[in-house]
Image (cartoon, rainbow, N blue to C red):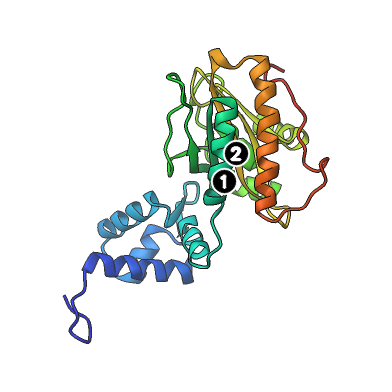
Amino acid sequence: MTDDRGAPVVKSADRLMILFDYLAAQSPATLTQIARDLGIPNSSTYQLLSTATRRGYIALDLEDKVYSLGSRFWEITQASQGDPSIAQLAQEPMDQLRDATQETVQLAQLDGMENVYLAIAESPLPMKLVSQVGSRLPAHATGLGKTLLAYLDRDELHRRLGNSDLAAMTENTITDRQELETELDLIRSRGCGEDREEYLVGCRCVAMPIRDRNDNVVAALSVSVPTPRFTPRLERTIHTELRQTIHALEKKLGRVASDAAGTPAIVSANT
């Protein structure tokens, strides 16, 4: 296959570039719309979308089944402009937080009703949470996800929830919509979210929001701990160290705030 000038063209790569251009102008769009408008078979379109979604270049809204450009394009644009992404800015503070707590630290952003992991600092201890950058988990079942959902406009939250069910990952997962909204209100009031073995039995988590210079919540940071190690003393340490780490990261993002602003109270996860 060659182009108009006789230069060789890789068909699949060419289709992927066409797909990106299409979504930049037409998103969100369904698989059927994309395949029809681009004249590509549904099976080929699905494969392209799946590959690009897995790498973060395309985002899938699971409720509405529509596709749009993903956060990876933003990261690349920021890097090309010499402005490091939040993942790059966060890694060193995350490593320091990991060292202070000896537990796994994770950074995530919201994509539809999933939280996408952007950076991880893994615990050095043998028993620990194992995760990876780029993985996705249901937001309603995780501390990071619930924290990010808590700062959405209520209309936007309802739009994302749509008519979908809240899947039970464990017996502790919140599956009732009203209960979830009550939990999100509590997270906003105290400034932190928790995972009480809601995604994985044996794992607890504390998460807090990260704000940019315009005071918008752009990501969240968490510390995950195996339940047997989640003592009141460690919980207090996590709240203190996590809050300090986020304040330092927000300064890197250009946010200027008083010490009182956005400072979450230390609330026992057992309450």
Residue 94 picture location, percent across and down: 56, 38
What residue is at 56 percent from the left and 51 percent from the top? 86
Pinpoint residue 200: horizontal percent, then vertical percent: 48, 23
Label 2 Cα neighbours within 10 Å, binned few <14 / some 14-19 / many ≥20:
many
For marks 1 and 2, give the one nearer the viewer. Answer: 1
Q: Which quadrant, please, contains the N terminus?
A: bottom left
Residue 22, numbered label: none
Q: How many marks?
A: 2
In the image, is residue 13 above or below residue 97? below
* Quadrant placement of the C terminus: top right
Residue occupying image coordinates x 68% and y 44%: 248
Q: Is residue 216 left or right of residue 18?
A: right
**Amino acid type of disc 2?**
Leu
- Name the residue that disc number 1 marks: 90
Q: Which residue position is annotated with label 2?
A: 221
Q: Residue at x 69, y 28 (%)?
A: 239
Q: Nearer the viewer, residue 207 or 253?
A: 253
Q: Of label 1 and label 2, which has the lower sequence position?
A: 1
Residue 17 as seen in the image, left or right of residue 169: left
Direction from residue 248 to residue 92 in the image, left or right: left
- Is residue 224 visible in the rendered image? The answer is yes
Contact, mark 1 vs mark 2 (Cβ under 8 Å): yes
Q: Report the residue at 77% width, 30% height from top.
A: 265
Distance between the alpha carbons at the discs numbered 1 and 2: 9 Å
Question: Does the rendering let one see residue 163?
Answer: no
